[in-house]
Image (cartoon, rainbow, N blue to C red):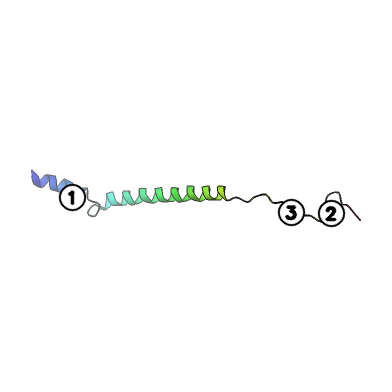
Amino acid sequence: MSQEIQEIASNKDIAKNWVSSSKFIFYVTVFALLALGLGNCAQLFNSRYKKTTVEVNPSSQYKPEYK
């Protein structure tokens, strides 16, 4: 009886069972990629380009002002 319990416990060990460890690594990788993607999107949204006012020569405007 005690041998059966030990065998079941050893089957759930990540180091011994490559199927459960590969599932775990897959889910950790998916979570990490989603976290990185969302973090990059949030950073781009927060640091987007600010609208600047550029001084344009009066003679090159849509309605030019000549001297």
The residue drawn where x is 24% and y is 52% is 17
Figure quadrant of residue 57: bottom right
Residue lying furthest right in this view?
Answer: 67
The residue drawn where x is 18% and y is 50% is 10
Residue receiving disc 3: 54
Q: How many residues crowd around disc 3 within 10 Å: few (fewer than 14), some, or many (20 or more)? A: few
The residues tagged by marks 2 and 1 sit, at their Cα atoms, a distance apart of: 81 Å
Residue lying furthest top in this view?
Answer: 1
Q: Amino acid at mark 2?
A: Pro
| Sequence-first tag of 1 and 3 | 1
Position of residue 44 measured from the top left corner of the image (x, y, whole percent):
55, 50
Q: How many residues crowd around disc 1 within 10 Å: few (fewer than 14), some, or many (20 or more)? A: few
- Looking at the figure, which quarter contains the C terminus? bottom right
Q: How many residues crowd around disc 2 within 10 Å: few (fewer than 14), some, or many (20 or more)? A: few
Q: Is residue 6 left or right of residue 33?
A: left
The mark tally for this picture is 3
Label disc, if present, on residue 10 of the rendered structure: 1
Q: Amino acid at mark 1?
A: Ser
The residues tagged by marks 3 and 2 sit, at their Cα atoms, a distance apart of: 12 Å
- Secondary structure of the residue carrying numbered label 3: loop
The residues tagged by marks 1 and 3 sit, at their Cα atoms, a distance apart of: 69 Å
| Sequence-first tag of 2 and 1 | 1
Label disc, if present, on residue 58 of the rendered structure: 2
Figure quadrant of residue 1: top left
The residue drawn where x is 48% and y is 49% is 39
Q: Amino acid at mark 3?
A: Val
Q: Is residue 48 left or right of residue 10?
A: right
Position of residue 45 measured from the top left corner of the image (x, y, whole percent):
56, 47
